[in-house]
Amino acid sequence: MLRYAASRLLRAILTIWIAVTVTFFLLRLLPADPTLLVVEGDMTPEMQEALRSQYGLDKPILQQYVLYLGQLVQGNLGVSFRQLVPVADLLLSRLPWTLLLAGSAFVLTLLVGIPLGVYAAVGRGGLVDRGVQFFGITSNALFIPSVAILLLVVFGSNLGWFPIGQAIDPDTRGLAAYASLLHHLALPLFSLVLVQLGPYALTLRTNMVEVLGEDYITSARSRGLTQRRVVWRHALRNAVLPALMLMGLQLGTLIGGAVLTETVFAYPGVGRLIFESVQQLDYPVLQGAFVVLAVTVVLANLVTDLLSMVLNPRIRT
Amino acid sequence: MSTEPQNLTVDTPSAAMTTARRRRAGGFFSAPSGWLSVGVLGMFVVIALVGPLSVDSPSGLGTDILQSPSTDHWFGTDDLGQDVFAQVVWGTRISLMVGAVASLIAICIGTLLGLAAAYVKRLDPVVTTLTDVMLSLPMLPLMILVTALAGPSVVTLITVIGLLSWPEVTRMIRANGLVVAAMPYIDGARVLGAGATRIISREILPAVMPLVVVNVLLTAARAVIAEAGLSFLGMGDPSSWSWGRILLNAQRSGTIASAWWQTLFPSLAILLLVLAATIAGIRYNDSRDPRTRGV
């Protein structure tokens, strides 16, 4: 068990290291000279030189790399070109919103996807099954901004049921603030879940169909256990584990979806920050956002893996 | 979204290898989903090739601002008076081109790595780890960063999407290649003195080729979505139209709520194209599966 946990931890560190290294060399290899991007307009060669040494760009590339890693470990992601505040501060103020959106989408997908996949697998060939298969393929083909815009137009502007834009009404306090929070979260969350749910339910259905054909299920049935008990106690556990791990692998896509959703709904998370930074060509923010999101995804993935380890008797021993 | 339906991975290619090509094609078109998806794909190809010749580029500024769909403007006009139908038609070319070329790049890299990992035991851990690492990273933010640094253009989009979309392909091809590599006829080829390159290219590759075809379609579908996403975030080629850019324009000009036609039609185009490519891939896979063939 410890060995498994250690190997997962090692994998997580390796992934973060690769993400960070790729970012560093991309930034140095691509033609864009950071000093030319800081401010537009004329710069004397001396100023440019001063700036280069300030950023450590006059040192050999390996030394720069070590310097960069050292700064990252200390949580230094550089300074935003446009807003002139530390990138780390900027990202940390936005990250909770992205975590809230992506985290609730993750949980909701699991909560709705599992029963959906189970019912489809148990009643194979039936109405629910056909529905799940159709939905699985269709929602795989949905473009998140399209879904988000549709929901925003119908339920936000036309029906006026939900607010459009922002994450909370700043004037609310206490319980009303939580209500406002959920109210603002509903549409972005729904558009994200709608796209995630289909393929997830479909995968769970496939796993469940396979598990239901196993010998130990037949044996459980022959012992006279009820269908409900066989399905929910015996089969589900073995079908959910691979599905949970798959969901962990899907976290990267989920975060990408959150970036797009936040953009449509002007939800103040990291994704919306990326959209704003793209328009202003704020490279340090884009770089920092990728590093922070990568670390988030890898850590969440690690948690999912450790969780399935606890649930899985075969790995636990 | 990249969770491919699981039934795509369980197929063993060898069973269908002896099937005549004619019968396989008949199987593919025997279901409505077969000819319907190919028909829609064909329609998009025709639009991409012929459309820009017959429809004027939506560059000029018109006086008909924010018109709803009419006989003059089939898909209405945007806030600058540009015809949305023309934008969608011109966008088809970019979306198809990025989807197709990026998919081919990803397929080449993915197949090569997948087959190498399946046959060469020493390479397997390296390739598997690299694939897992790539799969677990948030690709969209990485694509945004690279595109922003390289400068947005059609070439950048193709390269970035192509170079970052291979891990899914590698995973599928490797899993299938492992099954093939364990078959006795591979040992036979090795005994006859065939080298690794020859075995991979002459023996394993033909066996997994059907899966490669499926992957071309599925990867192209993902690439179209990725291109639309990058363009929607403002990372598209500023000098050419794409479906994502139409949505971005609506978002920027704040006409999302009022001008439904500006977002609906490009959205439908994306949905139709991606759905057609996905269904064609699934149908191709099913039509070769002895269990579901002829259904």
Image (cartoon, coloured by chain):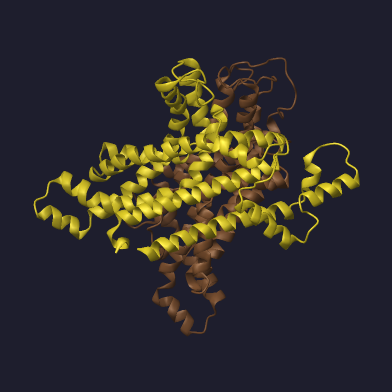
Quick check: can you spot residue B7? no
Determine the residue positioned at 25% across, 44% down. A124
Which chain did the image draw in brown?
B
Image coords of residue B243 (percent x, y): 61, 34
Closer to the camera in the image, B23 or B212: B212
Closer to the camera in the image, B11 or A60: A60
Determine the residue positioned at 73% across, 54% down. A28
Closer to the camera in the image, A4 or B222: A4
Determine the residue positioned at 42% across, 76% down. B185
Closer to the camera in the image, B109 or A227: A227
Image coords of residue A10 (percent x, y): 48, 62
Image coords of residue B255 (percent x, y): 61, 20
| Image vertical order of residue B67 relative to residue A184, above or below | above
Q: Would residue A269 be found to the left or right of residue B14 on screen?
A: right
Quarter occupied by residue A198? top left
| Image vertical order of residue A164 relative to residue A73, above or below | above
Determine the residue located farthest toward the left in the rendered image.
A224
Quick check: can you spot residue A220? yes
Determine the residue positioned at 59% across, 33% down. A272
| Image vertical order of residue A292 relative to residue B195, above or below | above
Image coords of residue A195 (percent x, y): 44, 37
Which chain did the image draw in yellow?
A
Total marks placed: 0
Q: Would residue A279 be found to the left or right of residue B5 on screen?
A: right
Quarter occupied by residue B54? top right
